[in-house]
Image (cartoon, grey):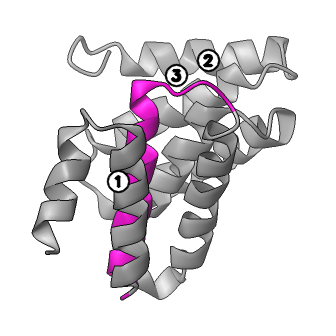
Amino acid sequence: MREAGKLDQVIAELEQRITNEPRTAEYPAALGQAYLQKCGTIRDVREQGILAMEADKVFDTALTLDPSNWEARFTKAMGMSYWPPVLNKGDEVIQHFQTLIEQQEAQAAQPHFAETYAWLGDQYQKSGRTDDARATWQRGAALFPADEKLREKLASIH
């Protein structure tokens, strides 16, 4: 949508759908993703910050409606991982990824679930918890042996 120049149109439509169907978690989850996409088109850091906080709020709305909404939780955690360290969001980001792994391991594996292990390991490594990072990447690689990103991460810490 971003490349087609239709992001604002999509955002407006999703905002309207949320107004019309406020109990559907998929709409705020999608709106948060659209807001983050729009952040990538804005040069003003202040505007990016405002939009990122709006995205975070609608992800919270989606998770209130459906705590197991994978897209909302994953994208919220991924987006928050880029927030400045001064905001102290690292532990919250780790908690979201840990929750995702618990939810994922209670259902049939899907290839995109490997991303959660990669991101959680990255967060552990960023916070100086190299052993936790290695263990997370090993667990992910055991569950998703074909995932190249997890294999590369493991190779980088040996």
Magenta stretch, residue numbers: 107-128
Task: Give the mark toward the camera: 1 or 3.
Answer: 1
Task: Residue 72 in the image: state x and y as whole percent.
Answer: 61, 37
Where does label 2 land, which residue?
A: 14
Q: Is residue 122 magenta?
A: yes
Q: Residues within 10 Å of mark 1 (few under 14, many from 20)?
A: many
Q: Nearer the viewer, residue 148 or 41?
A: 148
Q: What's the mark number on residue 118?
A: 1
Q: Using the rendered view, name the quadrant where residue 93 is placed.
A: bottom right
Residue 39 x %, y %:
35, 44
Q: Is residue 2 left or right of residue 120?
A: left
Label 3 SS: helix
Label 2 and label 1: CA atoms lie apart by 30 Å
Which amino acid lies under the numbered mark 1 shown in the image of this protein? Answer: Ala
Residue 46, visible in the rendered structure: no
Q: Amino acid at mark 2?
A: Leu
Q: Which residue is mark 3?
A: 11
10 vs 65: above or below: above
Crowdedness near tag 2: few (<14), some (14–19) or many (≥20) residues, C-alpha within 10 Å: many
Q: Nearer the viewer, residue 50 or 120?
A: 120
* Residue 97 visible to the viewer: yes
- Mark 3, other Cα within 10 Å: few <14 / some 14–19 / many ≥20: some
Position of 111 with respect to 57 (left or right) is left
Q: Amino acid at mark 3?
A: Ile
Q: Nearer the viewer, residue 128 or 61?
A: 128
In the picture, measured across the screen, residue 41 lies left or right of residue 111, that is left
x and y percentages locating residue 1 in the rendered image: 32, 15
Label 2 or label 1, whichever comes before in sequence order: 2
In the image, residue 5 sits, relative to residue 122, either above or below, namely: above
Q: Do the residues under discs 3 and 2 have CB atoms within 8 angstroms?
A: yes
Please name the residue shown 83% across and 13% down the image. 21
